[in-house]
Image (tube, coloured by chain):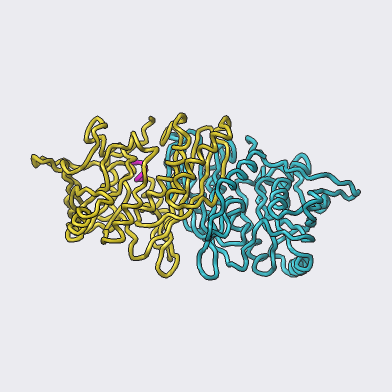
Chain colours: A yellow, B cyan
Amino acid sequence: MKEIKFIKDLEKMIPCKKGIIKGIGDDTAVLPFTKDKYLLYASDMIVEDVHFKADDAPEKIGWKAVAVNISDIAAMAGVPKYVTVSAGLTKNKSLSYRKRIFNGIKKICDKFNVTIVGGDTCASEKMVIDVSIIGEVDKKKVVYRSGAKLGDIVFITGVLGYGKEKHLSFIPKLKESQVLSSKFKINSMMDISDGLYMDMTRLCAASKKGCLLYKDKIPVSRKPNSFDDACSYGEDFELLFTVGKIEAGKIEKYLSENNKIKVYNIGEILEEKHGLWMVERSGKKTKIKPKGYEHIKR
Amino acid sequence: MKEIKFIKDLEKMIPCKKGIIKGIGDDTAVLPFTKDKYLLYASDMIVEDVHFKADDAPEKIGWKAVAVNISDIAAMAGVPKYVTVSAGLTKNKSLSYRKRIFNGIKKICDKFNVTIVGGDTCASEKMVIDVSIIGEVDKKKVVYRSGAKLGDIVFITGVLGYGKEKHLSFIPKLKESQVLSSKFKINSMMDISDGLYMDMTRLCAASKKGCLLYKDKIPVSRKPNSFDDACSYGEDFELLFTVGKIEAGKIEKYLSENNKIKVYNIGEILEEKHGLWMVERSGKKTKIKPKGYEHIKR
C-alpha cells in the first residue's frame, strides 16, 4: 500500500500536462506521435534480492529486465520498438558474466523485434538493471486500465501462481494483446505484476468500479500453498482485461474456433459502491483486499 | 577504458538496425519521428557512493539524476520533452525524504519544461536513480560526435574543473546548445561527462580524427590540484563541439556582440594519423591520454 500511496502522491505532484495523453498511473505513458499512432513510454527497474537473486542465471536476469517492460507495452495494446538498458553491476563481475546478461537481453529483444538503442553501465554494490521502453500503438486500439464499464466481463490470459517459478523466464503476453486488440473492443487492460488481488484493485480504482470474481473460475497452478498465494504472489504477468458482454461472447466464440491464445472468464464489473468481491460456488462472498506482491526476498 | 571496451563489445553485439538513425555510441539514440524531426532517446543511472553520497541533499540528488539526461539531449542539439524516473531507495528512507528527491526532480523538469510521465520505485540497499529521457530535434540541426572535420576549431562552453564541487547542481548547457545549433553549423558535439581527456578522445575516435589542443587556452578553475585534474576529473557537463574555421569566426563575432552564452576556442582537428596532442605555449607537446573520470568515491 505504501507504493500505491507514494504513486498517488506523485500523481498529485505531477499533474498531467497539456498535450500529454496519459502521464503517470497506467502501465505506460501515452504521448503524441503521428496522425494515427501514439507513442508508449515506460521504465521498470529490477534489483538483486528483490526481483532476482545474485546466483540466478545472468541470461535470465537480462531476459526478465526487458520482459517486464514488453509486458507493459502489451498491457496498452501496443507494439514494443526500442529499449535503453542501464545496468549497475558489482565490480567483481567478469566481462563474460556481463556478456551473459546482455545475451539474455538480446535474446528477448530479438524474439520481440525490439532494438537496444542505449546502454549505460556503472558499478553498484547490488546488481540493478533498469530498462526503459518505447512502443507504438494505433490510436484506435490503445487500452487504459481506467476503461472498465459496468457489466463488463473480466478475463485473464493464463493460469495464476507460476510467478515464483517462472518470473525469470516468462513470455510477455504480446501475442495475446495483439490478437485481442486487433479483433475485439477491449475496454480496460493491465498486466498482473503484483498479483490478481492487488492489480484487480488497481484496475477497479482507475475505472471507478467494483467487481465480482468467481473463485472456481480463476485458474491457479497446483504449486503454491494456497489459492490466496496464487492471487497475491505476483510476477505472473498475465493480462487482466475487461470487455462488454457481447464482445465477451465474440471472444469466446472466436477462441473456440482458433486456439492461438487462451483467455479465462473470471468475473464481472460492478458499480463502485458495491466494492470488490470474490464469490465461492457455495455462494460465500469474501471482500477482495489489495494484498499484493511485497517483493519478498527469494 | 573498461567501459569503452564494454560499450564497443555491445556495439558489435547490437548492430544498428534498419530504420534507426543512430543506435548505441552517441549521447542519445536518434530514431525516426516526423517528417522534419527525429526522436532522441537516452538513459543515465546515478548510484550512491559513485555519483553521489548518501548524505547529499536529496533535492540535489534528484536534480542531478535528470540534469545528466538533459545534458545528453543538449549534446545532440535537441529539446528535452519527457522523462521516466526509476528510483531504488533504501527502506529506511522516510516519505519526506522521498518527496525531497522528487522535489529536486520536479524543479529541474519545470525549469526545462520537461514532463515526468513515468515512475517506478523499489527497495534497494544502495540508492540508485535511473532516468530515461525522450527529446526531439530538427533533422537539419542534429549533431553527432562523429562529425568533426579536418581543420575544425574545437570549442567548449565553459570552465573545466568545477565537477567535484558542482556536479549535484550543474545546469545543463541547453541554452548554449540551442543558440549555437540554431545560428551556426556545428559539425560535432558531445557533453563532457568524464573529463576533457576522455571525451576529446571519444569525439576524435567517433570522427576518425586527431586533434591539437592549446593548453593555455583551456579555461580551468583554480580549485583542483592541477590542470590535469580539471581535464580528467569529469562531471563538468560542458559541451565540447567543433565547427569549420569560417563558422568559428562567425561564432566569435556573434558572441562578441551578444553575451548570452560563452564559448572557448581550445584547439583544432587534425588527421587521425597525427593522434591527439596538447601543446604548451613553449611549444612542448604531450600526447593526450584518455585518462577519465573513474567514478571516484567522494
Q: Quadrant of the C terminus of chain A?
A: top left
* Numbered-mark total: 0
Can see residue A17? no
Identify whether A194 is placed above or below A134: above
Is residue A220 shown left or right of residue A96?
left
Is residue B79 shown left or right of residue A223?
right
Q: Is residue A3 magenta?
A: yes
Residue B217 x/y as whole percent: 81, 54
Is residue B146 shown left or right of residue A50?
right
Q: Quadrant of the N terminus of chain A?
A: top left
Can see residue B186? yes
Q: Is residue B92 magenta?
A: no
Give the prevailing secondary structure in the magenta stretch: helix
Residue B92 x/y as whole percent: 44, 34
Residue for point 72% across, 50% down: B200
Residue for point 69% across, 67% down: B185
Of residues B240 and A17, the one drawn nearer to the viewer in this rendering: B240
Identify whether B232 is placed above or below A247: above
Residue for point 55% across, 48% down: B14
Residue A209 x/y as whole percent: 22, 54
Of residues B77 and A69, the one drawn nearer to the viewer in this rendering: A69
Report the residue that reaches farthest toward the right: B282
Q: Which residues are magenta?
A: A1-5
Give the quadrant of residue B61: top right
Of residues B71 and B108, the one drawn nearer to the viewer in this rendering: B71
Residue B191 x/y as whole percent: 65, 53
